[in-house]
Image: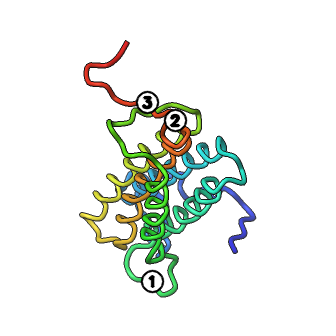
Amino acid sequence: MVKLTKIYTGGGDGGESGLVDGSRLTKSHDRFMAIGDVDEANAAIGLARAALKPDSHSAHLLARVQNDLFDLGADLATPGEIEGALRLADGRAAALEAEIDTLSDQLGPLTSFVLPGGSEASARLHMARAQVRRAERRVVQLHAESPLNPEILKYLNRLSDLLFQLSRAENDMGKADILWQPGGSD
């Protein structure tokens, strides 16, 4: 378990921060940009979770997702192979797929693109989905420079799909979705 006795260290005051292997990079390095985007997505998921019923399946599922994102962030902060390093576990993307499949079976088929909105919880889930997509783009960019655990890429891709389906579920199982209409509507 992590125990922090002091929140600030001053080690990053010069614009650098440390990785798990002890190396230091500028805070604007692609690796830290990816870690930051994942952290921002995690915060957005927390905000969405706050709008859900606390004991709902969706809230419990998102609590697991937030823990996964911490593991994913630790994985990003650990370049190379380090014995015993915390990594996003294999199979986490498959677990999201199972949840997406369950939701898809419960929701009606899509007849149009869905616009973000509807209920507050749905709108927050859409915002989190968009932030996960941004994190995914940044992680893909980092992966092109320095190969990462492939589970990270799959996980972020599935996570945005899960958040989309959860947003539909929060809109009365898709009945209150706001559908795109070519040319807009009045």
Q: CA distance from mark 2 to mark 3?
A: 11 Å
Q: Dot 3: few (<14), some (14–19), or many (≥20) neighbours within 10 Å?
A: some
Q: Relative to 3, does residue 115 appear above or below in the rendering? A: above
Residue pointed to by mark 1: 82
Q: Relative to 63, does residue 94 appear above or below in the rendering? A: below
Q: Which numbered disc flags the more N-terminal residue, 1 or 3? A: 1
* Quarter that holds the N terminus: bottom right
Q: Which numbered disc flags the more N-terminal residue, 1 or 2? A: 1
Q: Dot 1: few (<14), some (14–19), or many (≥20) neighbours within 10 Å?
A: few
Which amino acid, by three-letter code, is at mark 2? Ala
Q: Which numbered disc flags the more N-terminal residue, 2 or 3? A: 2
Can you tell which of label 2 and label 3 is closer to the viewer?
A: 3
Q: Label 3, secondary structure: give it.
A: strand
- Residue under the image location 29 percent in, 68 percent down: 146
Image check: 105 left or right of 55?
A: left
- Residue under the image location 57 percent in, 48 percent down: 43
Which amino acid, by three-letter code, is at mark 3? Ile
Image check: 81 left or right of 14?
A: left
Which amino acid, by three-letter code, is at mark 1? Ile
Nearer the observer, 51 or 37: 51
